[in-house]
Image (cartoon, rainbow, N blue to C red):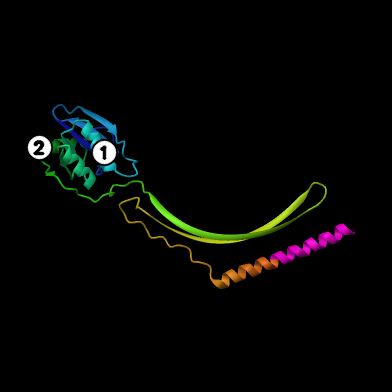
Amino acid sequence: MKICVTSTGPSLDAPVDPRFGRCQYFVIVDSETMEYEAMPNPSIGASGGAGIQAAQTVAGKGVSAVVTGNLGPNATQTLGAAGITMVTGASGTVRDAVEQYKSGGFSQTSTPTVPEYSGLGAGAGVGAGAGMGGGMGMGRGGGRGGGGGRGMGGGMGRGMGMGVPVTPAPAAPTTPPPPQTKEQEIQGLENNVKTLESQMEEIKKRLEELKK
């Protein structure tokens, strides 16, 4: 019979990958001859439905049993519908898992052992943010093809987003930057006014020089 073992590498001596839908490799072993076929998991980078896609992949290989670490609800349902025996809790190497299965060391399961998305290795998130900013600038230039300009601007914005965790471990919460206080905004605008007044004085001086 053909046994599919989730693996971190393409050989019998590679460690068992505890994930199913997002495991690195499927090693399909003939339990009688121990001949095997290793194939990369095409669903490892799927944004969603990895368990279903992975189950369909191994079902298409005609396997009779799947040996892995954990199974989510979607994979369990799809494998069960295909009549494939499911075994969880495997560890060690692929070879060890096959030998243990052949010796009856595993118990079959028909229920998921982890929630949906537990093996998600790449996260997807959506977020929305709003910001505002303003700027002013003035410039001066001479009549010989050369010129210089100066400008300034200030802006502020805040945004918040939420996404799916990228690993089973809880992510550290992030704190959005505090908003500007009214006093800070007033101070910034006053500084802008002073800078603009200084630029205006320089422009007036330059105009007087050019008129002489």
Q: Amino acid at mark 1?
A: Ala
Determine whether, in the image, residue 85 is placed left or right of residue 11.
Answer: left
Q: Is residue 13 visible?
A: no
Label 1: state its secondary structure: helix
Majority secondary structure of magenta residues:
helix
Q: Position of residue 103 (x, y in %)?
A: 9, 37
Q: Nearer the viewer, residue 136 or 150?
A: 136
Residue name at image x 24 percent, y 51 percent: 115
Q: Position of residue 190 (x, y in %)?
A: 65, 70
Label 2: state its secondary structure: loop
Q: Amino acid at mark 2?
A: Ser
Quadrant assignment, res 207:
bottom right
Q: Which residue is mark 2?
A: 103
Mark 2 and mark 1 residues within 8 Å of each other at the beta carbon: no
Q: Nearer the viewer, residue 66 or 110?
A: 110
Quadrant assignment, res 22:
top left
Q: Which residues lie in the magenta part?
A: 195-212
In which quadrant of the rendered image does the N terminus lie? top left
Q: How many other residues sit within 10 Å of disc 1, few (<14), some (14-19) or many (≥20)?
A: many
Q: How many marks?
A: 2
* Comparing labels 2 and 1, the label whose residue is closer to the camera: 1
Q: Nearer the viewer, residue 197 or 33?
A: 197
- Magenta span has 85? no
